[in-house]
Image: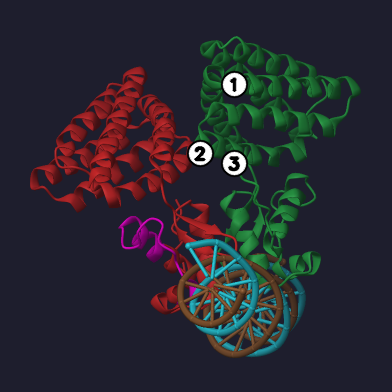
Chain colours: A green, B red, C brown, D cyan
Amino acid sequence: MDLRVAPLGVQSQAVDKLREAIVSGHFQPGQRLVEAELCRLLGISRGSVREALRRLEGERLVIITPNRGPSVTELSWEEAAQIYEVRALLEGEAAALAARRATEVQRTAMAGALAAFDTAVADDDALSRIHATARFYDLMLAACGNGVIEEVLRGLHARINLLRSRSMSRQGRAPQSAREMRAILDAVQARAPAAARKAALLHVQAACAAAKEAMAERQVA
Amino acid sequence: MDLRVAPLGVQSQAVDKLREAIVSGHFQPGQRLVEAELCRLLGISRGSVREALRRLEGERLVIITPNRGPSVTELSWEEAAQIYEVRALLEGEAAALAARRATEVQRTAMAGALAAFDTAVADDDALSRIHATARFYDLMLAACGNGVIEEVLRGLHARINLLRSRSMSRQGRAPQSAREMRAILDAVQARAPAAARKAALLHVQAACAAAKEAMAERQVA
DNA sequence: CATTATAGGATTGTCAAACAATCCATCGCC
DNA sequence: GGCGATGGATTGTTTGACAATCCTATAATG
């Protein structure tokens, strides 16, 4: 086990803060990120800001246009749909692998995360819902044993989150989402790869449909 | 159509040169990339070098360890195998989509690229083989119509190339590879998605097996 | 009036020089 | 031989500067 404690330089903190600001919607998609201003806000030098922005560009959260500078990535619906397609493929595979490989400990942990999600739904606690979902996914991706799938999906999730800030995941969706995740977990616990893949696929497709609806609502608004 | 001509700043050139140096094996996997030295070699300032390295880190060609600096990514066989798994999934999907969506022009272009590959095999011209393969893939990915698949696969290919420098794609593989690509193209031209997916999958699996063998040879050497 | 130059400010791209913090290898000491 | 101190090498970060580019508002022109 790796117990290394990171010194955590100025840049890494800047990256974290900026990422947080972006996915939380504090910086809107399309908004330009002026370097001088970020220097002021973060209290660091321009060089460090620029490097931090390059890192976020690598995560596709920021797009840097030559001679125009960085702005928050804008996600068209078309792109989002493509991301959901890839997610369906990879999350299906991840679920199938997890069903095959997850240890007892990992399955229990996933069950715990899902339970937390259920209570968050009951309490109507949006923040806890997000955290529980993230934990559930982290556990499943760790259990699938393929670090590349994990890495790619992490990136795709981050990008999809860019939509969340505008489409504010709708109300009725949470309980349905809980049922879908339950189906995945059941299949994983039953060590049934095919069922797990199908359940994960349905979950992604449902999320895609929900996002599409939310997007349409936004359009008319 | 976008006819924009890029001003192409110092950094972008540096990124290109460095990427070329890495995938060509001029910088060996694991080798440390000392900033001061790169400044000398590239003739640019340290700030620009650092930003260029951050970009390459985003492509996973370079890994930057805190307080230790950048080095060329080392690809373990385990990681490579995981990449091949994901490639199998995504290239299968890409081939299926291409079979469904490719226009006549695109199919013709793919046929042209494959013909170029055949002559390169006949002439035993390694460089042309690589170029033709790259073109074939670019065309297929463009034809599949999913930019996200394209982007992810591009990244995975670049990473797999890190192996090439040590495992020097073996001799007998090329004609076999040509047959596999032919099978993909045939399926695409026949507009047979399922067949295309299967052919692409076989191609990736064969590439994976070849890489594994080459790796094993290297081990004993 | 519409359209095209022009000027100016804002912003990015790049460089240079400096210094603290960290790492690593070497040397001397016990 | 193990162990701590020393010092050089390298990275992390800052500051300041300047050219190149972009954008906008204004002025000139037909």
Q: Is residue B34 magenta?
A: yes
The chain ID associated with circle 3 is A
1 or 2: mark nearer the eye:
1
Q: Position of residue A143 (x, y in %)?
A: 58, 27
SS of the residue under disc 1: loop
Q: Which residue is mark 3?
A: A155
The residue where tag 2 is placed is B148
In the picture, residue A66 is in which quadrant?
bottom right
Chain letter behind tag 1? A
Which residue is tagged 1? A103
Mark 2 vs mark 3: give the one in front.
3
Say which element carries label 3: helix
**Vertical order, C13 against A26 (above or below):** below
Relative image position of residue B198 (x, y in whole percent):
33, 21
Residue A28 seen in the current view: no
Whether B164 is drawn above or below A133: the answer is below
Q: Is residue B198 left or right of residue D29?
A: left
Task: Give the amino acid at mark 2.
Answer: Val
Cβ–Cβ under 8 Å for marks 1 and 2: no
What amino acid type is highlighted by mark number 3?
A: Gly
Q: Residue at x 15, y 35 (%)?
A: B175
Magenta highlight range: B16-36
Name which residue lies at 32% across and 31% down: B204
Label number found at residue A191: none
Residue B131 lies, in percent from the top left, at: 25, 49
Left or right of A204 in this view: B113 = left
- Going by the numbered disc 1, the residue's amino acid type is Thr
